[in-house]
Image (spheres, rainbow, N blue to C red):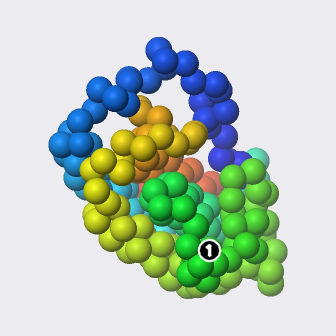
Amino acid sequence: MGVCYHSAMNAPQTSSDSPASDSVSPQSAAQMLTAAIGQIRFARQYTLELLDATPKDQWFEIPDGLPSNVAWQVGHLTVSQYGLLMFRIRGRQPEDLELIPGKFRKTYGRGTTPSCETSSQPSPDELLERFDQVFQKGVAEIEAVAPDVLLEPVEMPYAAYPTKLGAVLFCPLHEHLHAGQIGMLRRALGLDPIR
């Protein structure tokens, strides 16, 4: 759980693995983007419900038998959402270094190890602030993306299409996966389910 493994992300893609991106029109891409934005908002609302019901003094606890904690999940979702909705769509911008500093990326990016040490990590409030900043900026940017840009190719991770649209489509799937992990961590911490 501490490492975000998506075995399909590392597997080579063949033409039979996903639909041909040239079969998607800009109009269809725009419709899929609208649906994806709705899913991104829904996933975030659910994740926030889980976090609101989790005492912040438990965010750094790593329950027995589990390799992660809530703080790492939030940091990881922040880094991933930046990557999927901003970096993959328009590349790195100078202001991104303040939004996702290198130390933050190295602490919470794919393949990193969660830690219960709080002195070297942002507080839960700081994590939530960055989590929200990336969400707000990411959604605003993809709402303004031209449909033909969505059809440009990208490398993994993506869902359905090997395009920028596919990266956007993967975003809510990824967040739901980690929301499930947060839910499991909450149960291991002795907290009741929220639904």
Q: Is residue 192 visible?
A: no
Residue that appears at 52% across and 55% down: 88
Q: Which residue lies under the disc numbered 1?
A: 100
The answer to which quarter of the image holds residue 27 is: top left
The answer to which quarter of the image holds residue 37 is: bottom left
Residue that appears at 76% across and 65% down: 106
In the image, residue 50 sits, relative to residue 20, either above or below, namely: below
Left or right: 129, with 38 as reference point: right
Q: Is residue 85 visible?
A: yes
The image shows residue 150 at horizontal and vertical percentages of 36, 48
Left or right: 111, with 32 as reference point: right
In the image, residue 30 sits, relative to residue 103, either above or below, namely: above
In this rendered view, identify the residue nearer to me: 39 or 56. 39
Residue that appears at 44% across and 23% down: 18
In the image, residue 11 sits, relative to residue 80, either above or below, namely: above
Left or right: 65, with 43 as reference point: right
The image shows residue 117 at horizontal and vertical percentages of 81, 74
Q: At label 1, which amino acid type do we have?
A: Ile
Q: Which residue sits furthest top?
A: 16
Residue that appears at 36% across and 68% down: 141
Q: Specify the quadrant that holds the C terminus.
A: bottom left
